[in-house]
Structure formats: C-alpha cells, structure tokens
Image (tube, rainbow, N blue to C red):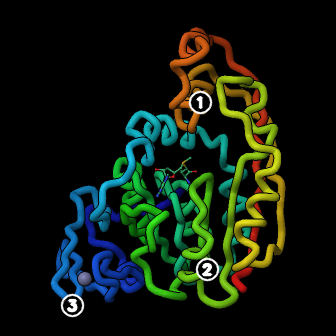
Amino acid sequence: MTSADRGNDPLPPRVVDALRCSVCGTPIGAAGRTLRCENGHSFDLARQGYVNLLHARIPAGTADTAPMVAARADFLASGAYRPLADELARVCADADDLVIDAGAGTGYYLAHVLDEVPSAHGLALDVSAVALRRAARAHARLGAAVWNLWEPWPVGDGVASAVLNVFAPRNGPEFHRVLRPGGLLVVAAPAPDHLGELGDLVLAVDGRKEERLDGTLGEYFARTARTPVRHQVELTAAQVRQAVEMGPAAHHLDRGGRRERLDALSESQVVTLSFTVSTYRRL
Ligand SMILES: C[S@@+](CC[C@H](N)C(=O)[O-])C[C@H]1O[C@@H](n2cnc3c(N)ncnc32)[C@H](O)[C@@H]1O
Ligand SMILES: [Zn+2]
C-alpha cells in the first residue's frame, strides 16, 4: 500500500460530515479532538485517531480480539489477499465520494480502494477498537469509528456512494439507508473451497451462502455482478497459523487437537484462496 499516514490528525472533514450523533441522531461537528452535536453530546478521538461512538455494551465475542487483529494484519501484509483488494478497488472505481467499509477491521481493503480512487474518502466502521487503531492510520482520507453494525448506524441518510462489506456482518436496511440512490454495495465472502487444504483447522464455508445473501439483500438491492477471485499461494507455516488465527476458527482451536496440529506445522504449503465479490445497486 502506498497510503499516506494521517498520524494523529483529526478525522477528515468529509467523514465528520457523514457522521451523526449516536445518542440523538443530529449532525456532529469537530472541535479539535472532540466531536460534538448541537445537544451537547460529545465523543473524544482516541489517541490512535479513531472515535468511539458506542454507548452500549456489546456482547462478548463480537469484536475481533487483539491476537486475531495482529494475525490478520501480519497475514494481509504478506500480500496474499492482494488480488481480492485489487478486485474491490476495480469495482469501486466510480465510487468517487464517500465509501463506508462495514466491518473494516484493520482498514486494509478500504485503504486500497482509496489509493485507487483519489477523489474518495472512507469511513471504517467496526466494533473492534483494536482493529480500528490500525485502520485510523491506514490512509490519510480514512476516518474510523467504533460501532456495532447491528444497531442503527451513526451515519446520515444517503451519504455514501459505496458500501464495502468484507467478511463482516451484513445489515441490509442500514446498507440501503446510508447509500445514495443508485449507490453501490460490494460484498466479499469466502467461497466453499477457500483454504480447503487446511481441512478442519478452518471453519467450513456454507455452500448456500450466496443464495442466502441475495435473499437477505433482495428487498433493498439488485445484484449487478458476481465475480470469483481465486488463486493459489504457497504459505509458510507461520502464514498458515496467521490465516487460521485471524478468522472465526480462532475461537475453536481448543477442540479436536487443532491447536497442537497448528503449532506442529513446520512446512510451507500451497493453499487455495477463493472468494466471491458480489456487487449490488441500491433500489
Ligand atoms: C473477519 S473480520 C474482517 C475484517 C476486514 N473486513 C478484513 O477482511 O480484513 C470481521 C470484522 O467484523 C467485525 N465485527 C464483527 N461483528 C461486528 C459488529 N456487530 N459490528 C461491527 N463490527 C463487527 C470484527 O471486529 C472484525 O473486524
Ligand atoms: Zn446528540
């Protein structure tokens, strides 16, 4: 990534414009490192550059943990998922205004889209503050806010030209509300053969996932394309461990001797990386 580093600067103004107070829903303005609405609700920017808009507790196990985030950041830095990042940037080429990444994690994909679309700004939403510490630094035109995607988003109506959703929870009504008419929704999901060589070290992908995805979104969106992104890479044993530890399987390593098998890996291995990228237009 060639992303510029915004360091400790406040959120980009374009991103602040799109945000709403998570208590009362009115617009918010930035005063130094604080965001404040007209009703006096205020939210401080964290030292690492993201803002936490949450005011309710979230269920344990919802957010990616620090070890999962570290494994994801190291794995993504290897470039193994670069073909997916390239495809996301390709389909977002016309999203020239605000791109919201719902469940952005470390901001890897959103930063790549912003690199490719110089007129765009990005809002990274995720419930994991640990992940957003990295996202906030991932690109100069990116702002990051901690939020639970299952709650109504602290974002204005019709403010986004595109919503990205990469391996993260999908809230169809909110995707629809925050997108401008005709806006673009991009959903990336693992395909059934993704990491197939790793057997039960990873969780099986539901073969009917795409059908369910179209069903959930059908009320609000028309699908325009579905593109497979598939390649094989040779991963070192350390990268295989990262690929397992960054995903939902990380929660299940204590069972079936998986942790022992993962720790015992010493050889590099060729694995299949396989995704589908589905694009939709807002109805
Ligand atoms: C598999 S990770 C994908 C992260 C990123 N899109 C990527 O591919 O690098 C799923 C992300 O969704 C976030 N997440 C899970 N449940 C969430 C929720 N209810 N609200 C917001 N984010 C959530 C996790 O914290 C995590 O960062
Ligand atoms: Zn307010």
Q: How much space separates mark 3 and mark 2, taking CA atoms?
A: 26 Å
User: The C terminus is located in which quarter?
Assistant: bottom right
Question: Count the marks: how many?
Answer: 3
Depicted 234 relative to depicted 46: above or below: above
How far across and down, in percent of the image, does residue 213 sit? Answer: 74, 61
- Left or right side of 165 for 270: right
In front: mark 3 or mark 1?
3
How far across and down, in percent of the image, does residue 192 sit? Answer: 80, 41
- Left or right side of 43 for 116: right
- Left or right side of 232 for 42: left
Residue corresponding to mark 3:
38
Label 3 neighbour load within 10 Å: few <14, some 14-19, many 20+: few
Taking the image as drawn, is residue 73 in sight?
yes
Depicted 44 relative to depicted 23: above or below: above
- Left or right side of 186 for 12: left
Q: Which badge, 3 or 2, comes first in the chain's sequence? A: 3
Establish whether ligand 2 lies closer than 8 Å to the Cβ of label 3: yes
Image quadrant of ligand 2 equals bottom left
Q: Which residue is drawn at 70% across and 23% down?
A: 200
User: The N terminus is located in which quarter?
Assistant: bottom right
Which three-letter amino acid code belongs to the residue tagged 2?
His
Residue corresponding to mark 1:
244
Indicate which disc residue 176 carries: 2
